[in-house]
Amino acid sequence: MSAPPSSAPRWMLYGASGYTGQLIAEEAVRRGHRPVLAGRSREKLAPLAERLGLELAAVGLEEMRGLVSALEGLPLVLHAAGPFIRTSESMVQACLATRAHYLDITGEIPVFENTFHHDAEARARGIALMSGVGFDVVPTDCMARYVAERVPGAHELDLAIVFSGQASPGTAKSMLEQVPSGGRVRRGGALLPWPMGKGLRRVRFTDAERTVAPIPWGDLVTAWHTTGIPNITTYMALPRAAARVVRFTYPLLQRALSVEAIRHGAERLIESRMHGPNETARNEHHTQIWAEARAPDGRRAQAWLELPEGYAFTAVAAVRAVEEVLARKPQGALTPAGTFGADFVLSIPGCRRLDALP
Ligand SMILES: NC(=O)c1ccc[n+]([C@@H]2O[C@H](COP(=O)([O-])OP(=O)(O)OC[C@H]3O[C@@H](n4cnc5c(N)ncnc54)[C@H](OP(=O)(O)O)[C@@H]3O)[C@@H](O)[C@H]2O)c1
């Protein structure tokens, strides 16, 4: 690998040895960055740091003094170690202490809410806190802003996702953490419980019409901040039969996963059996988003987005978000589209937005 220029951006990638962390590290180097690869295990970080020719910092999230010292002189952390419900707060505290911008790739609703609780402190410290710079929520946040700008005064926003391909072990473990909280929608500005599997509908995507079911996606928090629209539903495309099964089995799953021992057992199973998608799968699969904003007087706008596979997208989107934050130096707890605009997603190769179906 040829030596990069000394002006190459230097920041911390925490959780670098995880499945998604490695993809982000490789993308960062491709784009001329020199991130410090950080995480709690020197043994896991060393082969990656050697292969990419990067510095490493081995420090646990519970070691605040060590974290603060590792962050010395670095302007930003991209946090990729999840489930974030367990890891985000200590890194946010380290960033507030050292005045480093904080970005993460969470999709977990309580984590988005927690990030926004630190808005005033982030402003006072002159840093940005931005959760969700991956597949969840960059494309949906950009689409939310895009349709909302076309319908001033909109009171309803629907977003639907077609995810194709497989989940990484980290994503599966993060989903397990969310199951006991159940479904959610936003109504009248408040987050409300919603039975999983209820509210199925059909949505036309660019290639086909599909059944979609409400799911608790991060936009229930972020799109509310980005657009101010008080009624938001986020959907995922599912085979109709699967969506019906979810309605009856989910309460059982919720009860089972509320038991810590069962949740830990499921985590161990995921760790031993699951792998993230390989390069071929990342290149072959594609995803889609549909968004619609509606106003009380009947005005409405729809748009569609075609984009790469979720993990391939996340690696590029996260590094692009780092570049934008380093260049713009925004302050406070922020959303990607609220800060970079609706067209940010179009700066990621392989993304195509449509205002009408072909
Ligand atoms: N927003 C999105 O679209 C998006 C996309 C991809 C991933 N994600 C999220 O990103 C997270 C990571 O996913 P992944 O696929 O990379 O998972 P992974 O392969 O399991 O990697 C997880 C990483 O986090 C580290 N980690 C976990 N708990 C930690 C703790 N308490 N302290 C320090 N380090 C800790 C792990 O370190 P060890 O190896 O030492 O355990 C590992 O480096 C998940 O929460 C996933 O949902 C989100």
Image (tube, rainbow, N blue to C red):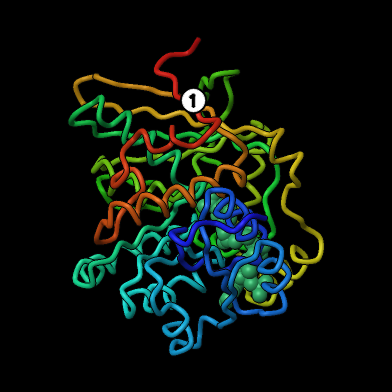
| Residue 179 seen in this snapshot | no
Left or right: 39 with respect to 118?
A: right
- Choose between 200 and 171: the one closer to the eye: 171
Up-down: is 55 above or below 294?
A: below
Q: Quadrant of residue 334?
A: bottom left
- Choose between 193 and 82: the one closer to the eye: 82
Q: In what quadrant does ligand 1 lie?
A: bottom right
Q: In which quarter of the image is residue 7?
A: bottom left
* Count of numbered tags: 1
- Choose between 245 and 87: the one closer to the eye: 87
* Structural crowding at the residue carrying mark 1, measured as other residues with C-alpha within 10 Å and reported as few (<14), some (14–19) or many (≥20): some
The residue to which callout 1 is attached is: 352
At which x and y percent is residue 76?
A: 40, 66
At which x and y percent is residue 266?
A: 72, 66
At which x and y percent is residue 262?
A: 70, 72
Residue located at (68% from left, 54% from top): 168
Residue located at (66% from left, 79% from top): 41
Q: Quadrant of the N terminus?
A: bottom right
Amino acid marked by disc 1: Arg
| Residue 188 seen in this snapshot | yes
Residue located at (49% from left, 31% from top): 289
Left or right: 299 with respect to 70?
A: left
